[in-house]
Image: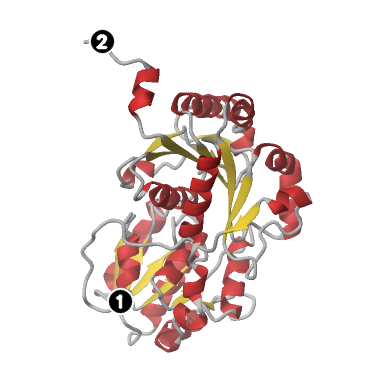
Amino acid sequence: MQQPTIDQANARAPSRRIMLYSHDTFGLGHLRRSRALATALTAGDPEASAIILTGSPVAGRFTFPERVDHIRLPGVTKLPDGSYVSSTLGLNIDATTNLRAGLIQSAVEQYRPDLLIVDKEPTGFRGELLPTLKWLQENSNCSVVLGLRDVLDEPHVLAAEWERKGAVHAAETYYDEFWVYGVESIYDPTKGLPLSAQSRARMHYTGYLRREMTDPAEVTDEPYILITPGGGGDGAAMVSLVLDAYETDPTLGPPAMLVYGPFLSGDVRDAMDARVEKLGGRVTATGFDSRIEALFAKAQGVVCMGGYNTFCEVLSFDRRAVIVPRTVPRLEQWIRASRAEELGLVRMLDDGRDGMTVEAMIQAIRALPDQKKPSQAGADGLLDGLDVVVKRGRALMARKD
């Protein structure tokens, strides 16, 4: 039987095509944000489909809804000296970047998206997105959006980084709109960037991205506090401090449910598992759980780091939370957590103010039941992000018809 041509196959495919790019050199945040956006943009619209381009090494461990798929780009790893290498291919970083760039452009040329949403990096990893952006500008009527989380970094650090990458020029040359997944009154992530007035006029603050349970999961009915370092790659200190608290105070409760994340592994995790075992059930531990929304929904409280996705889950499931933000290599988490604490949404455990001591963690866990829930500080009014994204996305695709 004769196989259909590409044009014939495309003619039968959903007519509104969305592509999302996230460089994903580390962690889970970019992939999980792209997954939430793709799910919202295709839900309730049988003519819409989405493909996520991601470098995340754990992309295959997530489920994706109908008409949402992903393409895994070759992974890269950041070394302690700040340089990058291929995760598995044995190629130097230039060859790996060229391979990724070619795959990205090929996917775009074949899929022909109506809307491309780029997560955080205007030029992509090491400029890998620039050839595709130029091709789209010259050969397509695809709308291109730069999506920014609520906080990127300290203004002067961000300005230097964007200048080095040529990101301001790329943002103003290739992007139709800028979507900030936050609220302007809380923080302006572009503070310090020399964006033109015309570019700022194309900026839309969507609100935070509400999270819901996308996959069913069996969760205990017994009370517990959820301990999550997000992806886990930089969360060992926070997890260890929680274990210190339960080891030091035998009356501390309720029990803790620890989710390590996929990047907290090896000898560090083995040592923590041994400590958990000795606590006799007062702390239980599991590895990566792609259905963590269900664990948030039933937790009495949360101790977590300050990543964007975790913060959205705290707000969405209205959980009392103690946030322990990282401060290196970026101040992003600290800025987010400090602003949220000012608004009464969460409690922050700040090294400079509280000290990262066992006593401070014990007190923070004990105080969790007396904290206000985020909804009592007005969190519900901050979570319109997905609704605004769908409205803006459909408007851009309609404009290109």
Q: Secondary structure at mark 1?
A: loop
The reply, left or right, for residue 127 in relation to residue 396 is right
Mark 1–mark 2 distance (CA, rounded to whole Å): 58 Å
Q: Secondary structure at mark 2?
A: loop
Number of residues whose C-alpha sits closer than 10 Å to that of mark 2, classed few (under 14), some (14–19) or many (20 or more): few
The structure residue drawn at horizontal position 50% and vertical position 28%, both measured from the top left corner, is: 108
Q: Quadrant of residue 256?
A: bottom left
Q: Is residue 178 visible?
A: yes
Q: Nearer the viewer, mark 1 or mark 2?
A: 2
The structure residue drawn at horizontal position 34% and vertical position 57%, both measured from the top left corner, is: 270
Q: Which residue is mark 1?
A: 224
The structure residue drawn at horizontal position 30% and vertical position 73%, both measured from the top left corner, is: 298
287 or 135, nearer to the observer: 135
| Quadrant in which the N terminus appears | top left
Find residue 63 and name its label: none
The structure residue drawn at horizontal position 73% and vertical position 44%, both measured from the top left corner, is: 168
